[in-house]
Image (spheres, rainbow, N blue to C red):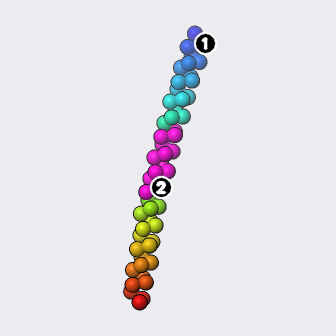
Amino acid sequence: MYLNNGNWFHENVLHCRNSMIDYYYKIVFTIKLKSIKLYRTVLFTQWLLCSLTN
């Protein structure tokens, strides 16, 4: 009985950890996508300002 409970606990912990890792990667991926868009926007804005001032 104890071993069964141990296995159940272990599987639950692993499953929980895996979903946390998935969640973490999704957050990182989203942040990277947003930062790339932000970076492009900044570059574009700088280019626009340079074009207007020249």
Residue at image x 57%, y 23%?
A: 10
**What's the distance in space between the residues labelled 2 and 1, CA to CA?**
43 Å
Picture quarter containing residue 1? top right
Q: From the image, give the main secondary structure of the stretch colored magenta.
A: helix
Q: Relative to 34, does residue 52 appear above or below in the rendering?
A: below
> Which element carries disc 2, helix, strand or loop?
helix
Mark 1 is on which residue type? Tyr
Can you give x and y, in whole percent of width and height, for residue 29 in the image?
46, 51
Can you give x and y, in whole percent of width and height, for residue 26 in the image?
45, 46
Q: Residues in magenta?
A: 20-33
- Picture quarter with the C terminus: bottom left
Q: Relative to 51, does residue 38 appear above or below in the rendering?
A: above
Residue at image x 56%, y 22%?
A: 9
The residue wearing badge 1 is 2
The residue wearing badge 2 is 31
Q: Nearer the viewer, residue 44 or 10?
A: 44
